[in-house]
Image (spheres, rainbow, N blue to C red):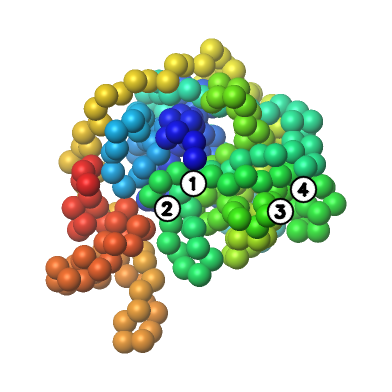
Amino acid sequence: MKPIERYPYMVELWPYPGCGGTLIHPEVVLTAAHCLERKGDLPKTLDIGRHNLKKVVNGDKFDTSPTSEMVLHPNWIVGKCGNKSCPDFALIRLKKASGMTPVRLSNSKADSPKEKPVIVMGWGRINDANDKSSNVLKEADLEILPDTKCKALQANTSFEVCADDLEKKGNSCNGDSGGPLIVAGDSALTDIQVGIVSWGPRKCLGNAAVYSRVSWAYDWIEDTMKNKWGLTLGEEQAPTVVQTEAPTPAKSECKDDPKFRYMFKKGGRDKVGKCKSFSKNKKTIEKYCKIDSVFCGCKKMCSNCGGD
């Protein structure tokens, strides 16, 4: 089990739209385009370097930066890439530079040859039998699959790469989208991000997943940052911030997410409910707030206002 500060570049897009991302420059986050397709998908703020989504714990150093704008890869066609492979890349500009350590990006396909050990991480679904996600950052050890096996999954190996856990212990899943696939170094400073969680089967455990190949989009990332924002990819990496106290959430953040939805049973039938669907009485609230996704989406109802 790695220390909670091992991945200071990890970014959460939770509870909505329920994705991950990586800090690649003090002012830029890299994620998947499909995480930001809909109007309002861009979170107003992003926590960078956070390990535990549910509460602030000792040693979990992170910072919070407001967002400015997002850019999707020009070959990602909104509404038309759901059933076919498209370059699944997006950039988010931060209004305030983060003090956390950015991750280095792969600029060569040679960084991810077949059988290369890699690590994927995120807060996504952890059980094929339900939609339960994780409060703490999880990771899985995988290896890069040959292009022949990747093509058999209907992936486009020019801009996608596939990885799997041959021991069938873990893989990326729903809610991990946008997060990194890395070749691990000795520390965050020497890690190299080779992929972005893009898509895979509903049954995650024991099945390969498809990742956007970072080296394919390296030039686009570099040019977009320079031409649109005047920023240089690969600038001197910022030191990890030492934060002794948790940031105090703004009152505006202590509210139920109006876009939150959860499938629950009522009268033996499946129903989609908002936060108010669970707020009938104390017993109902306690029952549903034990579910991680409800706890994250219904902050006001569950009294999740930055505390325990």
**Element type at marker 4?**
loop
Q: Between 98 and 1, which is closer to the camera in this rendering? A: 1
2 and 3 marks in contact (CB < 8 Å): no
Proximity of marks 2 and 1: CB atoms separated by less than 8 Å? yes
Res 104 quadrant in image: top right
Residue 134: image tag: 2
Between discs 4 and 3, the one toward the N terminus: 4
Residue lying farthest to the bottom in this orientation: 267
Q: Secondary structure at mark 2?
A: loop
CA separation in Å, label 4 and label 2 = 26 Å
Q: Which residue is mark 4?
A: 145
Q: Which residue is mark 3?
A: 166
Q: Residue at x 79, y 37 (%)?
A: 113
Q: Which is more toward the observer, 274 or 153?
A: 153
Which residue position holds label 1?
138
* Residue at the (35%, 74%) spot, across then down: 264
In the rendered structure, which amino acid carries the disc numbered 1?
A: Lys
> Mark 4 to mark 3: distance in Å?
10 Å
Is 70 left or right of 234, judged from the image as shown? left
Q: Amino acid at mark 4?
A: Leu
User: On screen, 237 above or below 38?
Assistant: above
Rendered view: 74 above or below 79: above
Q: Which mark is residue 24?
A: none
Q: Amino acid at mark 2?
A: Ser
Distance (Cα) linking label 4 and label 1: 21 Å
| Nearest to N terminus: mark 2 or mark 3 | 2
Residue at 36% over, 64% down: 261
Q: Which residue is the extreme one toward the top?
A: 236
